Image (cartoon, helix red, strand yellow):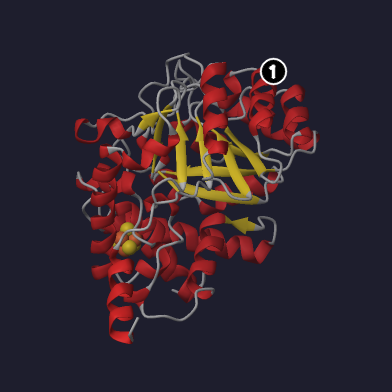
Amino acid sequence: MDNARRSSAHQRDSAIPKPFQPTVRLLIVQPTPFCNINCSYCYLSSRSSRATIDDRTLENLFAKLFASGWVRRRLDLAWHAGEPTVLPVAFYQHAFAIMERHRPGNLDVCHSFQTNATLLTKAWCGFFRDAGIRVGVSVDGPKHINDLSRVSRSGQSTFPRVLAGIRLLREERVPFHVITVLTGESMRSARALHDFYAAEGIEHVGFNVDESEGEHVSGLEPGPASWRAYKDFLAEFWSIAAREGLVKSIREIDYMVRAVYQQPVRRIDAAPRRGNMLVEPFAVLNVDHRGNIATFSPELLGQVNADYNDYIIGNVNTDAFAALPHSGVLAKMSADIEAGVEMCRARCGYFHVCGGGEPVNKMAENGTFVSDVTSYCRMTRMGVADLVTTGPNAG
Ligand code: SF4
């Protein structure tokens, strides 16, 4: 073949889309939508349902996923949403045994639980420790702040039970981190939050923010005052933690330091967005108790949306995994999410550290995936990026 024909054949070949081979990095299983408490900022509309995933669904999920070739050497598996510990330890021992029967020998599975800690017992601690499970505890700080939002189903304080759970984890030597949802009150209370964590020996913290998701509308005032309050909170908290050395890691700061300083130098418009799993089809796979499958932002599963079939792209009991990439819903979502990412890429100076944001927030705040900036990204991306480039003590 002469060079001209070789070149034109090459151009034709590269225009043919290669078969799409998904890579699942994070699997989130919702074994039950039920939660035993009733936080005011919760977006889970079915958190009163006691429905539970059954054996057939677990068998189909693990058999089909592991046979698909979509999982490489390591899989993070999060048991999440509603409260996972409302089901007994025996449920998870059985579920893990089902998973193990199908797990390829060369695959590492790293389990994690996010819990409100109100139901923890020594048996739970032993299970977490023996299975090497990563544990995250949801608590919003000291009692007067925690109980503003994290209340029982009858509206009572959850704090004593949460604290008992945290202390039990420490006594039983189960490593854990804490996730706190920031509200208007807690953003004014960096010192109080820090001192609570320090007093309870909590060394690793992450801060979510009261964000609009699904039916929940954030209680934060929309606009620059809230964006500034978030940044000021994080700056003050970081400054205290760095000075006193008791809280060792702040998830948002650690993430952004890596994103800002460990990127190879490249033009912003050439920046890849591989770092953003939430806009990559199948990088995050979410499965609910009925076997429904969704991808992109985990919070989408369980929400209602007529345009996107409630974000459900298939079901582990009725669909072959090979058919999922051809789902019409997936194609529509992918195209719209991708269009939103391209708007971010074209217009946002933070794209290289963000990768196009979170589809669930774009939908909740802007009413469409085909959009860019949100209040959420102004706080958690732009604000944090500005902070780590100036340092915690910059005025
Ligand atoms: S910071 Fe906001 S506007 Fe910028 S890339 Fe991220 S989501 Fe898009």
Q: In front here: 177 or 153? A: 177
Q: Quadrant of ligand 1?
A: bottom left
Residue occupying image coordinates x 22% and y 54%: 371
For the residue pair 280 and 78, the one nearer the viewer reads as 280
Name the side, left or right, on which 196 lies relative to 54: right
Using the image, determine if residue 79 lies above or below residue 383. Answer: above
Q: Give how far across and how far down residue 328 sits, in percent.
A: 25, 38
Q: Is residue 139 visible?
A: no
Element under disc 1: helix
- Quarter assignment of residue 183: top left
Q: Quadrant of the N terminus?
A: bottom left
The outermost residue toward the front is 1
Quarter location, residue 79: top right
Number of numbered discs visible in the structure rendering:
1
Residue extending farthest bottom: 3
Q: Is residue 155 above or below residue 27?
A: above
Residue in the foreground of this view, choosing between 67 and 184: 67
What amino acid is found at the position of numbered circle 1 in the picture? Ala
Instruction: Tell me which residue sits at (80%, 34%) in the image.
Output: 171
Task: Give coordinates of residue 120: x percent, y percent.
Answer: 67, 25
Residue, x 76% and y 22% (percent of image)?
123
Q: Callout 1: few (<14), some (14-19), or many (20+) C-alpha neighbours within 10 Å?
A: few
Q: Is residue 306 left or right of residue 244?
A: left
Q: Is residue 179 left or right of residue 377?
A: right
Residue 277 sits above or below residue 264 on the image: above
Screen quadrant of the C terminus: bottom left
**Mark 1 — residue?**
90
User: Residue 242 at what x, y percent from top left?
Assistant: 63, 65
Q: Is residue 22 visible?
A: yes
Image point (43%, 15%), residue name: 49
Q: List x then y, in percent, for residue 331.
A: 27, 45
Quick check: 128 above or below 377? Answer: above
